[in-house]
Amino acid sequence: MRRRLTADNKYRIFILGAGFSKAAGIPLADELWKVILKRCDHLTGRASKLNDDIEAYLKYCYDCKGVKLKRDTINFEEFLGYLDIEHFLGLRGKDTWSEDGNEGQVVVKTLIGEFLSGYMPKPGKIPQEYIEFAKRLEPNDYIFTFNYDTLLERALDEIGKSYRLFPYRYESINKYGGTIDSSKEEVVILKYHGSIDWFSKKNYKSTIQAWKEQGYDKTPDDVIFGIDAKLRLSKLVDGPRFEDDPLNDIYRVSEIEHLYGQNIMFQATPYLLTPSINKIIYANRIGDFWRGLGDTGYLNFGMSIIGYSLPAHDVYASQIIYSLVKNYQEAYWNKDVCGHKKTPLILVDYQKSLEDIEKYKEHYRFVDYNKAELCMDGFNLESIERIFHDDNVVS
């Protein structure tokens, strides 16, 4: 891939976790499990198999580890990791449900989408912090987010700022690679765990093909892609793409509140990775988002980590962030590159006591705090001022 490096290509990196969205009233990950457990009491039919999965996991923990858990003491991430392994290895054989997961995984993904969509602020009612954050983003800025919600996209749409949700747009591609199209000025948002508004058209296309082969001339109905869906769909990627890019079949649904207001269980599954300790086994679903993250950021002049506590179960994320931070704080530090110098790494989180701050710093023990600043009062207008401090321009 060819790309000309100039001062115009300079960029900043922003890493977002659940704490970024907390100020908008969007629940944190540990609150999801409580809601899902409550919903389990009302699941019927095929969806009730999530209850069967929970009971099987409780038995597994006792038989294999001698640990007697109750439903409300289950570690959500470990439980989903158990389901991921079962599905990924096909331990159910012919009873393996679909490429979206077995029944329990599909139920969890759908409930996550339904739950979070209910908290999304409507246009015109997005909190000022997010509008201000969106206004300060510049073309070539990279957002690496582990959140499922669409809060940032809505803020950017509100102010009319262009963005894309995939790493590269190409002018042309061939079997040896592609030429990157840098002609569009846009913010880059990479959603490593997928999104509640992403849905794959792959199964629908397969159904159409199967119907044709059987002589049917009608178009199959579908809650997302059917002619009566009226959900304002847009393709996630655009321009020339490689045939094996898994994002080719992904579409965004603008009317997510309308969609999740219907009963879509087992009719449509959001394209996301559940909060599992083993989510890395499905990382290929997010295409080439990971490629090159360990490279030195020659033109990376700013970096912030906002609301991401680096949980122990996200081992792969720790390795990614470690590489980004080390490259940022060590490569070309205090050097004049295209008339600019790097500024301190900004770490934003909500930690009130000195003890909690020290625990947070221990999670990020690889950070050189001589080249970093802590903002421990959460994501707010004050921390935004620190995040977007002017970079060092060499006179």
Image (cartoon, rainbow, N blue to C red):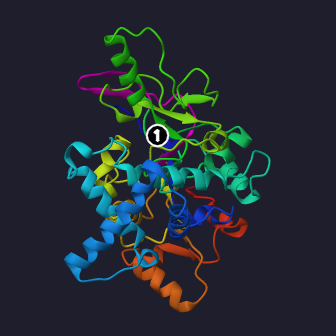
Left or right of residue 361: residue 306: right
Magenta segment, which residues? 169-191
Write down the quadrant of residue 373 in the picture: bottom right
Picture quarter with the C terminus: bottom right
Magenta stretch, main secondary structure, is strand
- x, y (%) of residue 242? 33, 26
Write down the quadrant of residue 210 in the picture: top left
Q: Which residue is drawn at 63% across and 29% down?
A: 232
Q: Residue 181 in magenta? A: yes
Q: Residue 342 in magenta? A: no
Q: Nearer the viewer, residue 25 or 164?
A: 25
- Per the image, the residue denoted by label 1 is 6
Left or right of residue 45: residue 349: right
- x, y (%) of residue 230? 64, 27
Q: Can residue 290 be seen in this view?
A: yes
The kind of secondary structure element at disc 1 is loop
- x, y (%) of residue 31? 55, 69
Q: Which residue is drawn at 30% across and 56% down?
A: 84
- x, y (%) of residue 351? 58, 81
How many neighbours does mark 1 have within 10 angstroms: few (below 14), some (14-19), or many (20 or more)? Answer: few
Q: Which of 378 and 283 is in front in this view?
A: 283
